[in-house]
Image: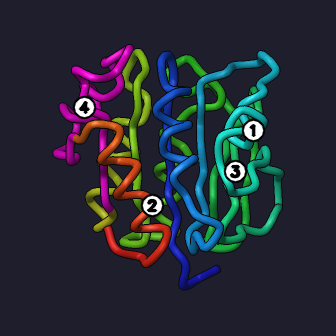
Amino acid sequence: MAGNAIVVIGASEGGVDPLRQITEGLSLKCGASVFVVMHTGIIPSSLPEILSWHGKLPVHFGRDGASIVPGLIYVAPPDHHMLVTHDYIQLNQGPMVHHTRPSIDPLFSSASEAFGKRVVGIVLSGTGSDGADGLAAIGANGGCSLVQEPGEALSPGMPQAAIAADAPERLPIGAIARRVAEFCSNGRR
């Protein structure tokens, strides 16, 4: 896995449709691994099934200790933070971050630390400020930081907080989906 790249996506209220648009545009030749944190709390989630219905790539809940494989989409399971190392996934039930578990910031920060310039981080629709610090870390380590255009987001709080914390590129969801598909196909951001 050491030479591959990853995409990390954080979403909350209003984020399912933008997330679906991104993942359905990914081809079976995707050379990156994709990680998703959606604020679900302890409530059972059907997000892997929803994303599978609309896309070509396999979608699974992340499992503690599982190897990171290109061409797969990993979703944080309910009530677990999901982090990444160079080679595998780590899950934990540590303290809530931004009043939620799973939280976006732990994933983004771990991805930035493990993959540096080979990370594309994306903050989608949601309330609060989760993802802002992690996206800033991705940008500071040379990764690509993108945020859904706040005016387009059903809940613009998370995109606005990410913009205030850093200088991510603001794009409408269609442009983000194209950028991610291109990145996953040939490694260009």
Vertical position of residue 143 compared to residue 39: above or below: below
Seen from the viewer's position, the closer of residues 109 and 15 is 15
* Residue range of the region highlighted in magenta in the rendering: 144-170
Q: How is the image coloured?
A: rainbow
- Label 3 sits on a secondary structure element that is strand
Earlier along the polypeptide chain: callout 4 or callout 1?
A: 1
**Which residue position is annotated with label 3?**
74
Q: Which mark is residue 181?
A: 2
Vertical position of residue 58 compared to residue 16: above or below: below
Residue located at (50% from left, 72% from top): 5
- Label 2 sits on a secondary structure element that is helix
Earlier along the polypeptide chain: callout 3 or callout 2?
A: 3
- Look at discs 1 and 3 and give the one toward the viewer: 1
**Which residue position is annotated with label 4?**
149
**Which residue position is annotated with label 1?**
48
Q: Are marks 1 and 2 in contact (CB under 8 Å)?
A: no
The residues tagged by marks 1 and 3 sit, at their Cα atoms, a distance apart of 8 Å
Q: Is residue 22 left or right of residue 41?
A: left
Residue located at (58% from left, 64% from top): 27
**What amino acid is at disc 1?**
Pro
- Look at discs 1 and 2 and give the one toward the viewer: 2
